[in-house]
Image (tube, rainbow, N blue to C red):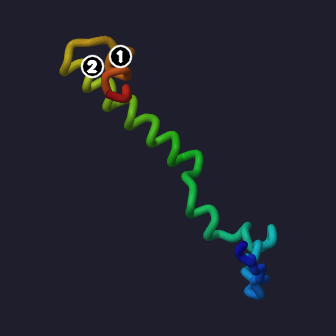
């Protein structure tokens, strides 16, 4: 019969959680796109889809499927 030993880990890991005030700085807004940037990205994507559909002579909807479908 073997004897089992139990030990307690005395190390403590601490994770600091930032406060709301610390999070809401100008730096946080640099992490995400703003509305104007999102609108520009959307316009560029639509333009690329239209060009692709014209080049391939397919519908806009088919171009979306061809470009964004997982293969």
Question: To which residue does mark 2 refer?
Answer: 53
Please say if 49 is above or below 12. Answer: above
How packed mark 2 is, by other alpha carbons closer than 10 Å (few <14, some 14-19, many 20 or more), is: some
At a point 80% along the width and 67% down the height, the residue shown is 20
For the C terminus, the image quarter is: top left
Residue drawn at the location 79% of the way across and 83% of the way down:
8
Locate residue 37, reporting x and y percent.
50, 48
State the residue lying farthest toward the front.
1
Farthest residue to the bottom: give it. Answer: 10
Q: Toward the viewer: 25 or 69?
A: 69
Instruction: Name the quadrant containing residue 31.
Output: bottom right
Q: Residue at x 72, y 72 (%)?
A: 1
Q: Can you tell which quarter of the image residue 46 is in?
A: top left
Foreground of the two, 55 or 8: 8
Q: Is residue 59 left or right of residue 35?
A: left
**Left or right: where does residue 21 sit relative to residue 46?**
right
For mark 1, does the 10 Å Cα neighbourhood hold few (<14), some (14 to 19), or many (20 or more) residues? Answer: some
Quarter holding residue 59: top left
Q: Which mark is residue 45?
A: none
Give the secondary structure at mark 2: helix
Residue 35: x percent and y percent? 59, 46
Q: Is residue 2 toward the left or the right of residue 37 in the image? A: right
Q: Measuring from the top left, give residue 17's x and y in whole percent.
A: 76, 72
How far across and how far down the image is residue 34, in percent?
58, 51
Q: Depth check: give the residue in front, 22 or 1.
A: 1
Most extreme residue toward the left is 55
| Tag 1 residue | 60
Q: CA distance from mark 1 to mark 2?
A: 6 Å
Residue displayed at 27% across by 19% down = 53
Which secondary structure lies at badge 1?
helix
Kindly check if marks 1 and 2 are in contact, taking CB atoms under 8 A apart as contact: yes
């Amino acid at each position: 019969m073997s004897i089992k030993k139990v030990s307690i880990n005395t190390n403590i890991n601490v994770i600091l959680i930032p406060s709301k005030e610390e999070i809401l700085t100008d730096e946080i807004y640099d992490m995400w796109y703003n509305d104007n940037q999102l609108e520009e990205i959307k316009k560029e994507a639509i333009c690329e889809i239209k060009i692709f559909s014209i080049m391939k002579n397919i519908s806009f909807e088919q171009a979306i499927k061809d470009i964004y479908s997982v293969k």
